[in-house]
Each structure stands twice: as structure tokens, then as C-alpha cells.
Amino acid sequence: MMPQLPRPVIHECLPCYLYRVAGETRCDGSLRGLSFYRDESAPRASALERKVRLLGGFCDCEVLLNVVRPATTEAIRLIDAGEDLVCKGVRRGTIQPCENWLMRRGVQWGGGRFSRRSA
């Protein structure tokens, strides 16, 4: 039986949630954390799994490695040290990252570049 995932904190962005969950559970090779976040916080983002797979995110840890990256030196320092990262917050229903992260833009999101907001 799989361990229960923690619920997203109010206004917590997807990458901060996945980073927090990655510190508590092992990656099982699926997008379980991403799907759980979507169901809890952004249920209208029905194409999320398809989009992150196009960007190289085939499991929760690959989303953190390939789809998003830290946006600030402070975030990089905390992540490299394995410390907690305080989410800067996003509105409910969005899959956009907070100011701690940049999202890689793909076919629908602009050609493989990292940027602050998606198109």
C-alpha cells in the first residue's frame, strides 16, 4: 500500500509541493504527487500530466529536474542544502510556479526555454 501524500498547503505552488513531498516520500516512478496536487488544488488543469511529459517530466522527481528549476540564488542554496523552501504563494487553481521557480516552456509553452510565466 502506498503511503498517503500530504495535502497541499493553501496557496502552495506545484513545484514547492513536489519539493516538499520529495523530502518525505520516495519517488515511485509515477506522477502521483503531481496528480494529487492537481486534484486538490487545480482540478481544471486536465492536461497537466500530458504537458509535463512533453517537457520531460515522467515522474514527480523528473518534474523537479526537467520541467522547473529554481529561480533565485536563495532557492538554489536551500535546495542544494536539502532545507525547507517557503513557497511564495500562488492563486488557487493555477499550476504556475511561485517566484521560487521557473517553468520550462515547451511546445505549448514557448519552445523549451525557462521563463517566469507560461503563454
Image: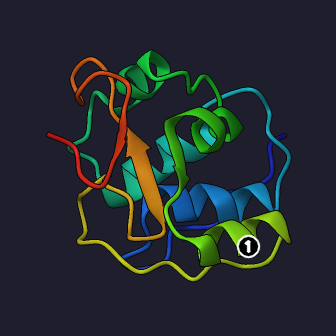
Residue 62 visible (yes or no): yes
Assign the N terminus to one quadrant of the image. Answer: top right
- Position of residue 48 relative to residue 50, above or below, is below
Check disc 1: other Cα within 10 Å, few if <14, some if 14-19, many if 20+: few
41 displayed left or right of 59: left
76 displayed left or right of 12: right
Assign the C terminus to one quadrant of the image. Answer: top left
Dot 1: element:
helix
Q: How many marks?
A: 1
- Position of residue 91 relative to residue 94, above or below, is below
Snapshot colouring: rainbow
Looking at the rendered structure, the kind of residue marked 1 is Arg
19 displayed left or right of 53: right
- Position of residue 54 relative to residue 79, above or below, is above
Q: Residue at x 36, y 32 (%)?
A: 113
Name the outermost residue toward the front: 73
105 displayed left or right of 54: left
Q: Residue at x 24, y 52 (%)?
A: 117
- Residue nearer the viewer, 20 or 71: 71
Q: Residue at x 38, y 59 (%)?
A: 97
Q: Residue at x 38, y 20 (%)?
A: 50
The image quadrant that residue 54 belongs to is top left
Question: Mark 1 highlights which residue?
Answer: 77
The image quadrant that residue 83 belongs to is bottom right
Coordinates of residue 47 in the picture (x, y in percent):
28, 27
- Residue nearer the viewer, 54 or 80: 80
Coordinates of residue 77 in the picture (x, y in percent):
73, 73
Coordinates of residue 12 in the picture (x, y in percent):
44, 72
Residue 4 visible (yes or no): no
Name the outermost residue toward the left: 119
Coordinates of residue 62 in the picture (x, y in percent):
66, 33
The image quadrant that residue 11 belongs to is bottom left
